[in-house]
């Protein structure tokens, strides 16, 4: 009899684990996925067109809070945990729920989920959400362009809509963002690459995605999400550590796997860090991954017009996932507000409406910044209305996109940008040259 499997996920790694480890394997029967972290992703179906010949009716996706009932009702033999950016204590709590309901439990197998490529692969991952993957990815892509290599980025999945339609997505122009009905979270990741002249792929079926990307790329750049492990086997594995959150490189799953497997550990935000925190990361590196190369880097922040911040009462809008399950209380917008002498950072909580109010209930630790949540049209409208209601002089946009293109902002606003600056110039370039030739 086939072993009955339930995969716990968040509309990303869970589908990839199924595709690489369970699809078309008759010794297993995946009876359900559970979903969490992202709004409105449960009570759907992983479609038959993606699930393979053994699942002509697809596979149901259920809320995670139904886990124990599903284990009992579906007679689940094993639960596979397949999402990211959670503590080991959290994983242990899910293991207890599963075993108490009568199933065995394990986290996903890392190696089988890393698909080999015919092209050199550079992977950019992190120990937590919000470490600085985006600016590092942009930095590496510029290096590859200087080296005369055609680089295509493949982004970690964010498939929150029609899964069958999103199987393989290619983004080569800004218009493609609208064509594929992207959420704000997706636009934050794709738009900067497109504006820099690079093609981005994403979707659900990462085997099919790789086959398409290889047709037009000299080098594949894996643009990781959260603190997840790479979906492709890297020739150069870069993991970013955060000295503003020392110790997270060992206490969060699966970022600790990235920390242990990395060829390069890049310590970002050195310009904001305390020396003791940097030393703590270096000590853990020596214990867990002594052979990795260490690169230290700053993350300088630039305001498009500092006069809109100086002496003003500002509302700071930051990257959503960094503030929610990433657990950060500040981002580039907050750094810019303090750097340019804002009179006050206005608390958005008295003004929140609808789904934005719900976000603060789920994540009360967010504090006095506004997460740029935009999972669907209603949430975008709620974000727009929250900003409209807020009593402030200026809106500081700390997300990496032109938010005013997505929603209407009825107040003066200023965009904040941030890049990667190596403290010892050229080290990363030399490592990349060895890989790509």
Image (cartoon, grey):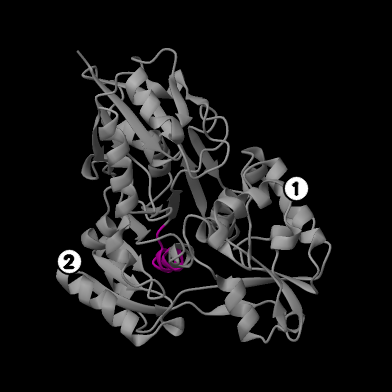
Residue 91 seen:
yes
Q: List the residue tagged with mark 2.
A: 288
**Residue shown at 81%/70% (left/top)?**
412
Q: Does dot 2 land on a helix, a strand or a loop?
A: helix
Find residue 158 and report its horizontal and vertical position in percent. 50, 43
Type of secondary structure dominating the magenta stretch: helix
| 213, 391: nearer the viewer | 391
Give me the residue at 66% from left, 85% from top.
340
The disc at residue 221 is: none
What is the magenta range?
Answer: 139-149
How many residues crowd mark 2 within 10 Å: few (<14), some (14–19), many (20+)? some
Classify residue 6 as left or right of residue 198.
Answer: left
Q: Is residue 6 above or below residue 194?
A: above
| Quadrant in which the C terminus is drawn | bottom left
**11 shown above or below 332:** above
| Image location (x, y in percent) of residue 413 | 76, 70
Q: Position of residue 400 (x, y in %)?
A: 59, 63
Residue 229 visible in the current orientation? no
Residue in front for this viewpoint, 369 or 162: 369
Q: For mark 1, what is the residue?
A: 381
């Amino acid at each position: 009899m086939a072993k009955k499997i339930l995969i716990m996920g968040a509309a990303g790694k869970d589908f990839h684990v199924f595709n690489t480890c369970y699809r078309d394997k008759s010794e297993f029967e995946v009876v359900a996925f559970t979903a969490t972290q992202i709004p409105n992703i449960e009570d759907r179906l992983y479609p038959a067109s993606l699930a393979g010949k053994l699942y002509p009716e697809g596979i149901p996706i259920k809320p995670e809070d139904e886990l124990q009932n599903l284990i009992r009702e579906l007679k689940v033999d094993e639960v596979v945990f397949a999402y990211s950016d959670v503590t080991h204590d959290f994983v242990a709590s899910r293991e207890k729920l599963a075993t108490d309901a009568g199933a065995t439990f394990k986290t996903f197998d890392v190696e089988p989920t890393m698909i080999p490529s015919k092209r050199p692969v550079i992977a950019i991952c992190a120990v937590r959400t919000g470490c600085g993957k985006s600016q590092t990815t942009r930095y590496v892509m510029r290096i590859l362009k200087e080296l005369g290599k055609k680089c295509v980025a493949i982004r970690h999945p964010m498939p929150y809509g029609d899964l069958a339609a999103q199987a393989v997505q290619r983004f080569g122009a800004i218009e493609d963002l609208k064509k594929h009905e992207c959420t704000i979270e997706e636009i934050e990741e794709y738009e900067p690459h497109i504006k820099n002249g690079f093609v981005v792929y994403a979707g659900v079926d990462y085997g099919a995605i790789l086959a398409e990307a290889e047709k037009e790329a000299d080098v594949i750049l894996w643009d990781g999400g959260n603190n997840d492990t790479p979906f492709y086997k890297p020739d150069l594995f870069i993991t970013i550590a955060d000295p503003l959150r020392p110790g997270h490189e060992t206490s969060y799953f699966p970022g600790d796997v990235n920390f242990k497997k990395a060829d390069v550990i890049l310590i970002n935000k050195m310009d904001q860090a305390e020396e003791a925190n940097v030393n703590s990361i270096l000590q853990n590196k020596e214990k867990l991954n002594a052979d990795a190369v260490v690169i230290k880097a700053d993350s300088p922040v630039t305001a498009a017009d500092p006069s809109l911040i100086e002496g003003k009462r500002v509302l700071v809008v930051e990257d959503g996932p960094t503030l929610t399950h990433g657990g950060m209380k500040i981002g580039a917008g907050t750094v810019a507000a303090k750097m340019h002498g804002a009179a006050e950072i206005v608390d958005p909580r008295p003004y929140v409406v609808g789904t934005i109010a719900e976000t603060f209930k789920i994540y009360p630790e967010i504090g006095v910044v506004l997460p740029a949540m935009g999972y669907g049209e209603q949430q975008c409208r709620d974000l727009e209305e929250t900003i409209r209601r807020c009593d402030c002089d200026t809106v500081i946009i700390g997300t990496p996109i032109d938010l005013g293109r997505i929603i209407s902002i009825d107040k003066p606003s200023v965009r904040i940008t941030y890049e990667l600056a190596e403290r010892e110039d050229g080290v990363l370039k030399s490592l990349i040259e060895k890989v790509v030739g």
